[in-house]
Image: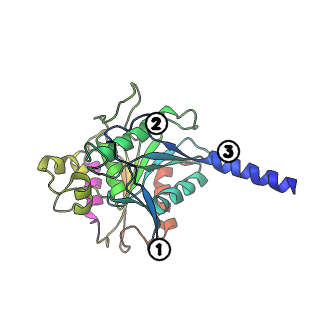
Amino acid sequence: MLYRLALVFILTCNCCFAQQEIPLYTGRIPNSTDAPNEEYKKANELVDSLTFNVSVPTLTVFLPPKDKANGTAVIICPGGGYHVLLTKREGSDVARTFNKLGVTAFVLKYRLPSDKTMKDRTIGPLQDAQSAIQLVRQKAVEWNIDPQKIGIMGFSAGGHLASTAGTHYREALIESTKGVSLRPDFMLLINPVISFTDRIGHTGSRKNLLGDAPTEKQISLYSNELHVNKATPPAFLVHSNADSVVPVANSLSFYSALQHNGVTTGLHIYAKGEHGFLTTPSFDEWFGRCVHWMKEMGLIF
């Protein structure tokens, strides 16, 4: 009996060590107002759970077993149209799978744009993505991470955030630490929103981030296919040609811009599959494509 209790205690401690949710900021959250925290979660049959009204950002750390850790890290940005976060299906579930491959994973619970909780709603999510990259780099030694193998992954609107982090890293929207780069080393973009243009952009994500009447300058600024250059991080994109929510043209335009600038990139387009890959392709199928690309890039061995 004592042995079993001891075993349970050890396993519990190990789990606590392997997964820990920490505040993204120490002290006051930048660009925040004094509005109360009204975050809540709601069960959902399709995606397990949804997180609403995020105003206090956190980073959940998923550490792989020490004997498997390979030094690569991925910061995961769940999707949800900048209205909600799919923190399990596009967050913790993916993080645990990365751990099995020796990759350290972080689920970013970023702030959802709101005039109530932010002074400037348009920059809040990107501030959180930049802070996450900064924090992971600062703690690279503590978490057994190679500071030059820190990537960012995003689903749908989370893909927009991840690609924004990869194309707008030169402009620090946070108090940056000297010598700590805000540039992710690679991007994994899953049926991502890339553009905010009328032609191919996802108007729901655009409205939630920029408001009802964005300026042409704002639309251009957050259409990330327009901001790729030769220093943009390598990227792998997965999308479905049948996606009726976020047109596949988003991934095609970003891939084209990356290729034009000589950035190492990969792209896989499925003939069938709804937005979010709820039924097809399977998780193992599309995630396996990401793993293959990461192996090609020397990020997984």
Residue 182 is situated, as x and y percent measured from the top left of the image, at 37, 36
Work out whether mark 1 precedes mark 3 in sequence or the reverse, and give the earlier one: 1
Which amino acid type is shown beneath numbered disc 3? Answer: Asp
Residue bearing mark 1: 45
Q: Are marks 1 and 2 in contact (CB under 8 Å)?
A: no
Which amino acid type is shown beneath numbered disc 2? Answer: Leu
Provide the secondary structure element on which disc 2 rests: helix
Q: Which mark is residue 67?
A: 3
Q: Which mark is residue 94?
A: none
Residue shown at 27%/59% (left/top)? 205
- When asked about the image quadrant of residue 203, the answer is bottom left
**Is 46 or 171 nearer to us in this picture?**
46
Residue 8 on the magenta segment: no
* Range of residues picked out in magenta: 245-261
- When asked about the image quadrant of residue 242, the answer is bottom left
**Is 51 or 200 nearer to us in this picture?**
51
Which amino acid type is shown beneath numbered disc 1? Answer: Glu
Residue bearing mark 2: 135
Q: Are marks 2 and 3 in contact (CB under 8 Å)?
A: no
